[in-house]
């Protein structure tokens, strides 16, 4: 039956390509995906796929019922939001919305899910069970649209037994898929520290509190969290990317702000580390006569790829594309709000290669020059549809 899936994916390719390019030209930021959702809804209507709009904001839930629809339900998810990046491209389909860009491939994810849904709808007499399509908003911004979708009940009525998601990977050649079972992507928390003291003239440091020096010491001391406090077997990253000391050549400001990200693969250690970060910041500041206010916004949890579901998905991918096209992936310190689903039901999040080094298509995610080898869309469509069908077969 996978030959039929491949044939349909090929026959729908031009439509998939047109969808991806339309979405790429009209990106919308997290929680603002009104026109994107309207476009997706119109396509679902054209394909005859019943769906609900306005879920958790601009989310969409569609149902494709095969024979004996109550037997089992598998969900497929795509994210639909874009990033606040100004695109640098000469492509005819580059962003029409200044300062907004699909630099993380969500346009491709949505196009792939639409065409995969179209295939499954055309084949609904060939399978038993129900396929639920989730077009999810706001992946890029905390607390993430996945959490809101779950709270809106998308995993129920009917009950979803397993969920799969796909994400483009510009470091892997087009035509390949990548899998990893177990903890796959890190948790991610946003660290905000504000150091407060008595500012003043930089020529009289004895009369002021040097908030800049204290904040610098906090950043340095924080490295103990990774080098001395983290369990050696648990990948951990603590990085600070924003340091604002808005003084002058001869002015020490009364306030300095620091912002960073904390990522790891163990939820218990994650909680302990959050406390350690707050203690180090506070004690370093107090020792120098200042104060440190710490706010850590809890982000996405560790993404857990269920061993059984991932094994079955990987086997299906090998059956579809051949063993040489399926690659074992390492863990990634990046985060993804699909992780929320993985803490509710068995999940598999896999990667779609989108690079074409011969054509120079290799720019990384979240960059102004990001693009994909569009031939990868066909691989993504066929793989999503085929994996869903194979998961429905589970006894």
Image (tube, helix red, strand yellow):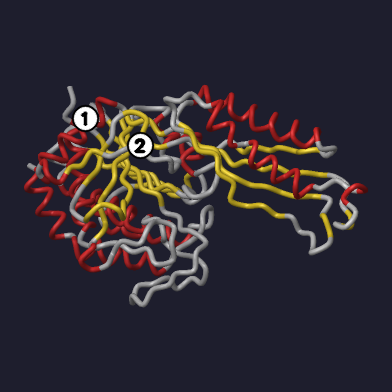
Label 1 packing within 10 angstroms: few (<14), some (14-19), many (20+)? some
**Image location of residue 122, percent across then percent down:** 17, 49
- Return the residue at label 1: 311
- Give the answer, above or below, for where 331 lies relative to 207: above
Residue sitting nearer the eye, 371 or 34: 371
Residue sitting nearer the eye, 198 or 81: 198
- Give the answer, above or below, for where 41 lies relative to 350: below
Disc 1 versus disc 2: nearer the observer: 2
Outermost residue on the right side: it is 207
- Give the answer, above or below, for where 86 lies relative to 251: below
Q: Quadrant of the N terminus?
A: top left
For label 2, the SS is loop
**Image location of residue 7, percent across then percent down:** 9, 54
Tell which circle, 1 or 2, labels the residue nearer the N-terminal end.
1
- Give the answer, above or below, for where 76 lies relative to 282: below
Q: Residue at x 31, y 59 (%)?
A: 43
93 vs 253, left or right, is left
Q: Residue at x 36, y 35 (%)?
A: 184
Dot label at residue 331: 2
Question: How many discs appear?
Answer: 2
Q: Quadrant of the C terminus?
A: top left
Residue sitting nearer the eye, 325 or 278: 278
Dot label at residue 104: none
**Image location of residue 333, percent across then percent down:** 43, 40
Q: Say which quarter of the image contains residue 71.
A: top left
Residue sitting nearer the eye, 4 or 188: 188
- Is the residue under label 2 in contact with that under label 1 (CB below 8 Å)? no
268 vs 127, left or right, is right
**Image location of residue 136, percent across then percent down:** 42, 47
For label 1, the SS is helix
- Residue 97 appears in the picture as rendered: yes
Q: Residue at x 48, y 35 (%)?
A: 187
């Amino acid at each position: 039956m996978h030959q039929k899936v491949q044939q349909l994916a090929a026959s729908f390719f031009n439509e998939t390509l047109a969808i991806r390019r339309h979405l790429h030209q009209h990106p919308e930021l997290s929680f603002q995906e009104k026109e994107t959702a309207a476009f997706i809804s119109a396509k679902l209507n054209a394909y005859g796929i019943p769906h609900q709009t306005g879920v958790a904001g601009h989310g969409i839930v569609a149902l494709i019922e095969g024979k004996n629809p109550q037997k089992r339900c598998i969900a497929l998810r795509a994210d639909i939001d874009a990033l606040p990046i100004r695109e640098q491209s000469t492509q005819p389909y580059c962003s029409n919305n200044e300062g907004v860009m699909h630099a993380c491939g969500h346009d491709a994810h949505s196009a792939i899910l639409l065409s995969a849904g179209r295939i499954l709808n055309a084949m609904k007499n060939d399978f038993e069970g129900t396929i639920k399509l989730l077009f999810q908003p706001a992946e890029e911004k905390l607390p993430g649209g996945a959490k809101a979708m779950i709270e809106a009940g998308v995993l129920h009525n009917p009950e979803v037994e397993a969920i799969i998601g796909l994400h483009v990977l510009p470091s892997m050649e087009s035509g390949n898929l990548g899998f990893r079972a177990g903890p796959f992507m890190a948790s991610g928390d946003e660290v905000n520290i504000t150091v407060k003291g008595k500012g003043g003239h930089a020529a009289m440091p004895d009369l002021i509190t040097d908030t800049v020096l204290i904040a610098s010491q906090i950043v340095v001391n924080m490295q103990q969290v990774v080098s001395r406090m983290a369990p050696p077997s648990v990948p951990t990253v603590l990085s600070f990317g924003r340091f604002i000391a808005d003084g002058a050549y001869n002015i020490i400001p009364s306030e300095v702000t620091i912002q960073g990200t904390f990522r790891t693969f163990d939820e218990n250690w994650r909680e302990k580390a959050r406390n350690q970060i707050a203690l180090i910041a506070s004690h370093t500041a107090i020792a120098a006569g200042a104060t440190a206010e710490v706010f850590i916004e809890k982000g996405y949890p560790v993404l857990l790829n269920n061993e059984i579901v991932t094994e079955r998905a990987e086997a299906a991918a090998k059956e579809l594309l051949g063993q040489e096209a399926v690659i074992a992936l390492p863990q990634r310190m990046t985060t993804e709000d699909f992780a929320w689903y993985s803490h509710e039901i068995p999940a598999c999040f896999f990667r779609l290669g989108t690079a074409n080094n011969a054509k120079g298509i290799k720019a990384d995610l979240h960059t102004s020059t990001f693009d994909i080898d569009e031939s990868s869309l066909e691989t993504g469509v066929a793989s999503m549809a085929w994996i869903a069908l194979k998961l429905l077969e589970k006894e």
